[in-house]
Image: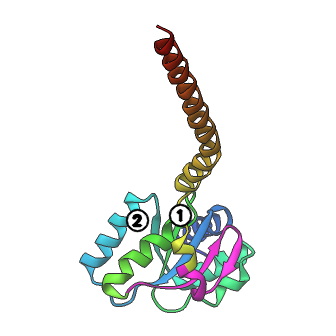
Amino acid sequence: MARPEKVAAVEQITEILGSAKSVFIADFQGLNVEQMSALRTKCREDSVKLVVVKNKLARIAARNAGRDEMESHFRGPSAIAFTYEDPSAPARVISAFAKDTDKPAIKVSLFEGNFYGPDKIKIIAALPSRDVLISKMLWGLNSPIQGLAGTLSGLLGKLVRTLDAVRESKA
């Protein structure tokens, strides 16, 4: 008979794998307590949750969530970094943290419902956040209108200066 804590842990991991926008499985072996605390703090700042999981429970949860391709990656010390907001945030946080310490290493990711290996992590980490993408799109949409307004303003200014010059020459 399964203990209630383990059943709850499996349900939590199943829910994460089923509904999070992105899930990254990382190997945190070699990080000391201070480094792990610093990583957790950085994750919290960027709305990323980091959960250390038991591999056996995580494999069961992966099976329950229909994510069989992730099951084989729960070997060794494993942590799940996930978010319900900005899908590329976990990759950015872990990659930035790993620049200094070379740890943690991302084993595999589930990004927007698609399964990616560690070779695609740099590409995902380079993606701008949703807010940045929206602001770039709005800037792109606003740019032609600003150009038109500037052109019309310049033409009206020339007309006013020309009329003023004609008025002065007749006076």
Q: Nearer the viewer, residue 23 or 89?
A: 89
Outermost residue toward the front in this view: 170
Q: In what element is the residue under mark 2? A: helix
What is the three-letter code of the residue carrying label 2? Answer: Cys
Q: In what element is the residue under mark 1? A: loop
The residue to which callout 2 is attached is 43
Check the image and report above or below for 119 versus 89. Answer: below
Point out residue 27 in the picture as x, y percentages from the top left corner.
46, 86
Q: Is residue 57 visible?
A: no
Residue at image position (29%, 71%) is 38
Point out residue 94 in the picture as x, y percentages from the top left corner.
43, 75
Task: Looking at the image, tell me whether mark 1 or mark 2 is earlier in sequence order.
Answer: 2
Where on the picture, by quarter, is residue 150?
Answer: top right
Point out residue 37 in the picture as x, y percentages from the top left corner.
29, 71
Q: Nearer the viewer, mark 1 or mark 2?
A: 1
Residue at image position (36%, 82%) is 99
Check the image and report above or below for 6 versus 157. Answer: below
Outermost residue toward the left in this view: 34
What is the three-letter code of the residue carrying label 1? Answer: Pro
Residue 120 magenta-highlighted = yes
- Magenta-colored span: 103-122
Point out residue 159 in the picture as x, y percentages from the top left corner.
58, 24
Q: Nearer the viewer, residue 56 or 19?
A: 19
Check the image and report above or below for 13 versus 154. Answer: below
The image quadrant where one finds the N terminus is: bottom right
For the residue carrying disc 2, how many other residues have a C-alpha within 10 Å: few (<14), some (14-19), or many (20+)? many
Where on the picture, by quarter, is residue 116?
Answer: bottom right
The residue to which callout 1 is attached is 128
Going by the image, does 140 lie left or right of 53?
right
Q: Is residue 66 visible?
A: yes
Outermost residue toward the right in this view: 66
